[in-house]
Amino acid sequence: MAKSVLAILQTAIALSIEVATALLIFPVKSANPETIHEDRIVLLEYGSSRFPESSMIRNGSNRMLEFSWYFYLIQKNGKNYLIDTGACDASKIKAFGIQNYVHPVELLRRAGVSPESIDGIFLTHNHFDHSGCLSQYPGARVYRSSGDTPPDWVTIRAANGHAKMSNIIVVSFGGQSALFTSDECYFREHCLAEKELAEVSLYNRTNNRQALRYIRQAHGNGAQFFTFHDPSQKKDAVYLVEGIYLILKGP
Ligand SMILES: [Zn+2]
């Protein structure tokens, strides 16, 4: 009896060591491979910071607000696309105080996607946190404007308020319209209240105003919209694995 109890204990200890080892090697598990090719759009969060509201909107307060850092993965018809790439430049990541940084390629691995399997990248603009990891995806076709003829389910709409070539990306997905705001507004409440960007975040105020009006009206007409820095964006999404959230599912 005592011997068999000992044997069970030894097996249990051996198993828990195996599990612990597996957790050490793979601290965050990847998504179930069987779900990789179903149509979906996921949000990938590669870090967080805090900035005063006054750096985000015109006449904002000095209140410090949590600020997230996102990019998006679209899986459609068996292909993988990104909307922006996240940040890869260590000096910029430090300068902008990005905490809990996870390399975007590692985030994609958690979502079950290798950098080689990215077919296309739709870019909102040319800032370090949006296009800074382009070199990680040498095989991907890059779409910077409507002139790059994106697939017929994607519209690249010039906004040019936040940056010289800032685009709002509109995606038809599963019968829905999903709009990605670029940084024409950082937080959803700012988009809907048409709060213009702070001077420090602005390229052209007239264009920014027009972009905000377009986003609000599109939302009024039923489009969902997604920003690249709003921490509350995650609350309406479905948590999948650490840093990965499902925002839309195909039909
Ligand atoms: Zn940004």
Image: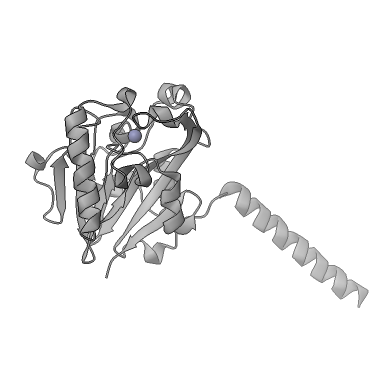
Q: Is residue 102 visible?
A: no
The quarter in which the C terminus is drawn is bottom left
Residue at horizontal 89%, vertical 72%?
3
Residue 64 in percent (x, y) is at 51, 32
Instruction: Say left or right for 44 vs 165.
Output: right
**Residue 92 place in picture, x, y as percent:** 41, 24
Count of picture labels: 0
Q: Residue at x 49, y 55 (%)?
A: 241
> Which quadrant would the N terminus be assigned to in this image?
bottom right
Seen from this angle, which residue lies furthest right? 2
Q: Quarter-wise, where is residue 76 in the image?
A: bottom left
From the viewer's perspective, tell me whether residue 95 is left or right of residue 196: right
Residue 101 x %, y %: 49, 36
Point out the quarter of the image occupied by ligand 1: top left
**91 left or right of 248?**
right
Asked whether 125 or 10 is in front, the reply is: 125
In the picture as drawn, the residue positioned furthest to the bottom comes out as 1
Placement of 99 over or under 155, stated as above or below: above
**Residue 80 position (above or below residue 59):** below
Inspect this view and state whether residue 190 appears. Answer: yes
Viewer-side residue, 33 vs 74: 74
In the rendered structure, the answer to whether residue 178 lies left or right of residue 247 reads left
Q: Nearer the viewer, residue 3 or 218?
A: 218
Please state the horizontal and vertical placement of residue 70, each as a whole percent of the image.
38, 42
Q: Residue at x 24, y 38 (%)?
A: 124
> Residue at point 41% right, 50% down?
233
Asked if residue 102 is positioned above or below residue 29 in the image, the reply reads above
Residue 37, quarter of picture? bottom left
